[in-house]
Image (cartoon, rainbow, N blue to C red):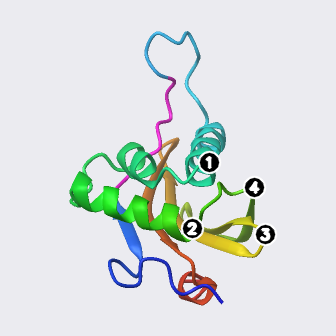
Amino acid sequence: MIRPFLASLLVIGTIAGAQAQTTAPSGSGSAELTPREAYQRGRALLDQLIMERKIVEAVTIFDPNEAMSRENLAVIEADLRTRYTEDFEHAAVVRSELMRNGFRQELIAYWTGNQYLYVYLLMHTFENRTQLLNFAYNSSFEELNGRF
């Protein structure tokens, strides 16, 4: 059994207040995105970064105001790369729950062989935009599944 990810540093990394962009980047010529399209683009980017074990980049993109220093994030990423020596090959939504009033939570698994990393997302969609309220990760399924 894999010991809990970052047990000595950070049992659960929580990043609050990140916001998914619901408009295309300026100069892209694209129309405004629907909340679903914004979610799909954000998930694709999140999957790519997590699967490549780029946690610092993921945190920086999804919450540029995160209080944790870049040095601490670099230590966390180094620990991730030590515990998971290969990029993840698979990603799948394990649980997804539509809640009331535009809230939704998801538990996503990333894995290679028998090594797993889980990511929890709490989102709120309102006024045609989606905001990421909570982002947490852990190697312990029970730790994040208990949030449902």
Circles 3 and 4: CB atoms closer than 8 Å: no
Q: Residue at x 66, y 43 (%)?
A: 40
Q: Nearer the viewer, residue 59 or 115?
A: 115
Circles 2 and 1: CB atoms closer than 8 Å: no
Q: Nearer the viewer, residue 49 or 148?
A: 49
Three-letter amino acid code at the position of disc 2: Val
Q: Indicate yes or no whether the magenta region holds residue 129.
A: no
Q: CA distance from mark 3 to mark 4?
A: 8 Å
Total labels drawn? 4
Q: Which residue is labeled 2 in the image?
A: 119
Q: Nearer the viewer, residue 72 or 48?
A: 72
Q: CA distance from mark 1 to mark 3?
A: 22 Å
Q: Residue at x 21, y 59 (%)?
A: 67
Q: Indicate yes or no whether the magenta region holds residue 21.
A: yes
Give the label on residue 43, or none.
Answer: 1
Q: Residue at x 43, y 15 (%)?
A: 26
Q: Tell me: residue 3, above or below residue 78.
A: below
Residue 25 vs residue 146: left or right? Answer: left
Mark 2 or mark 3: whose residue is earlier in sequence? 3
Give the label on residue 114, or none.
Answer: none
Q: CA distance from mark 1 to mark 4?
A: 16 Å
State the image coordinates of residue 146 (x, y, percent, origin top left). 56, 89
Secondary structure category for the residue under label 1: helix
Q: Which residues are magenta?
A: 17-24
State the image coordinates of residue 137 (x, y, percent, origin top left). 50, 70
Mark 1 or mark 4: whose residue is earlier in sequence? 1
**Neighbours of disc 1 within 10 Å: few (<14), some (14-19), many (20+):** few
Secondary structure category for the residue under label 4: loop
